[in-house]
Amino acid sequence: MKKISTISFLNIDGIPKLIKDFLTQKIPAFEEQVFNLKNVENQFQKKENSFSAAKRELLSAVLKKQHSTSSLSEKQNANLNFLTDQNTFTVTTGHQLNLFSGPVFFIYKILQTIKLADFLNEKFPARKTVPVFWMASEDHDFEEINHFKTESQYYETHAKSGGAVGNITVDDQFFITQFEEEFKDSVFGTELILLLKKAYKKGNSLSQATRILVQELFAEHGLLIIDGDDASLKAQMKDTFRNELLHQNLFETTKYTVDHLATEYGKVQVNPREINLFYLSETRNRIEFANDKYNIVDTEIKFSPEELLRELEEHPEKFSPNALMRPVYQETILPNLAYIGGNAEIMYWLELKDYFNFLALPFPLLIPRNSMLFVTEKTISKAQKLGLEIEDFFKNFAQVTKEILLKNNDLLSLLNKDESFLKEHFEELASSAEKTDPTFGNLVKAEKTRQLKSFIRMRKRLLRAEKIKQKEKLQRLENLFLTIHPGKNWQERSYNFSVFYSDYGKEWLQSCYEGIDVQNSELIIFTI
């Protein structure tokens, strides 16, 4: 496989404007959050000044305990020990506990985090940077993560959901039997099957399964895996959670930014709630305050303010941050420099800057994760025969198709020529008419609009006719689009990593790693 080209996120239609404006430093007050070496240097200093030795000792102890069931690589052991040093920092990514990693971008974001740590260790040899993967073990939407897809199959597991997904035990093994059938004859199929069986053996929770999977794939790179569902780590959040319950600080401090983003960009990714915490019992449910009581939504559980604060003091592990509070939790317990996330993640992090300032907590650098696309030489050849480059498939493809079907079309040229003549004619007529009578000028303008609409109708009719006439070419274009965008989605959001690993094994992981440029946000294109 070979890296053949890249497309900057700035040149891809589907990348949100907010992300593009962030990358080009067009959003006031976020210039220092964009990744560059100067901002990294500043972040080292901010985090060093705010992250205590006691926090380091606790973090190291918790991570050693959480990794005690794994056979650690030499690099992982070294990184665990480095964490107690005041000159050691982290770069982090996180993800849900998708079945067998879910979509392949799960792999890409971890590899980018590893490569970023390696890059910073090279650029700042007096410091040490450690890559960290945050397991979203407290999410409760099991239906969102209980499946994955390959080119030909859909795999799903079933379990009772509602509580923290990390605690769910996967007992049904049918998806493993299906997977074995699909991949038993692949070059690295046996390796994948054994990995799936090891991770999802009966009795393993989703947290255990995900840890095994990530450990097997990335241990040699020194990646550390953290599970935030931990009482001693959450104890550090008691003050923040208490103020959230009593004063709704997150909701209040983010109002201006949320309103600004909604006005400027049409909407925000996640709307803050008045209380951005869940309560963990047998299920994970939101906390709401009403009628002088804290109610655990969709349960019969109620607390007086005194009772809930006592519960927080005695059992911080029962309080779970939502999507907006989780970044605050992460940055409180990690000596973190940067967070690598998908576009949606970066967009909700951007809502939180004022809340971080309120907490006097350093806000990290934000890095939109890179995307990757693997295409065959045959697909590239087919595209080129139709006058297309891979980049064209990331533009408005309806417009691209239209241009191809109408290229060098004589009737279209004639329509364009006649339309230009009509515009010129009406402009001249309107100018003379207005001198005679303003209302006459308005009449001419209205007639111009009416007649020009007929050209729009004729172009649409012409395109419909060409689609029928060039049916075979249109079908080839649509098939190519679906090859590059399976299910009309980006490849990385459709396929599981097994699609690529089954043929290339760890060589594929290495190629992904080598292809990443941590200083740019881009789509990286490989041939296979």
Image: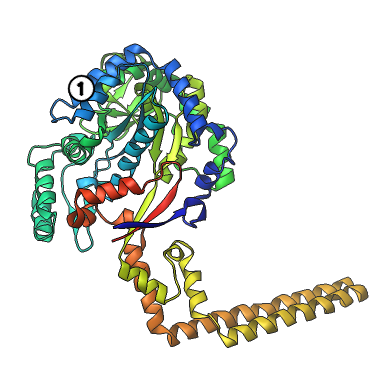
Residue found at the far right of this picture: 436
Rendered position, 244 above or below 340: above
Label 1, residues with CA under 10 Å away: few <14, some 14-19, many ≥20: some
Residue 224, quarter of picture: top left
- Where does the image place residue 283, in percent across and percent down from the top left? 23, 33
- Where does the image place residue 125, in percent across and percent down from the top left? 39, 26
- The quarter of the image holding the N terminus is bottom left
| Residue at the image position 50 percent from the left and 33 percent from the top | 33
Q: Which residue is mark 1?
A: 64
| Residue at the image position 85 percent from the left and 76 percent from the top | 440
Residue 393, quarter of picture: bottom left
- Please state which of residues 149 and 85 is positioned toward the viewer in this rendering: 85
Q: Is residue 218 visible?
A: yes
- Where does the image place residue 517, in percent across and percent down from the top left? 41, 45
- Where does the image place residue 211, in percent across and percent down from the top left? 19, 36
- The quarter of the image holding the C terminus is bottom left
Residue found at the far top of this picture: 54
Quick one: SS at disc 1? helix
- Please state which of residues 164 and 497 is positioned toward the viewer in this rendering: 497
Rendered position, 432 above or below 215: below
- Please state which of residues 486 and 301 is positioned toward the viewer in this rendering: 486
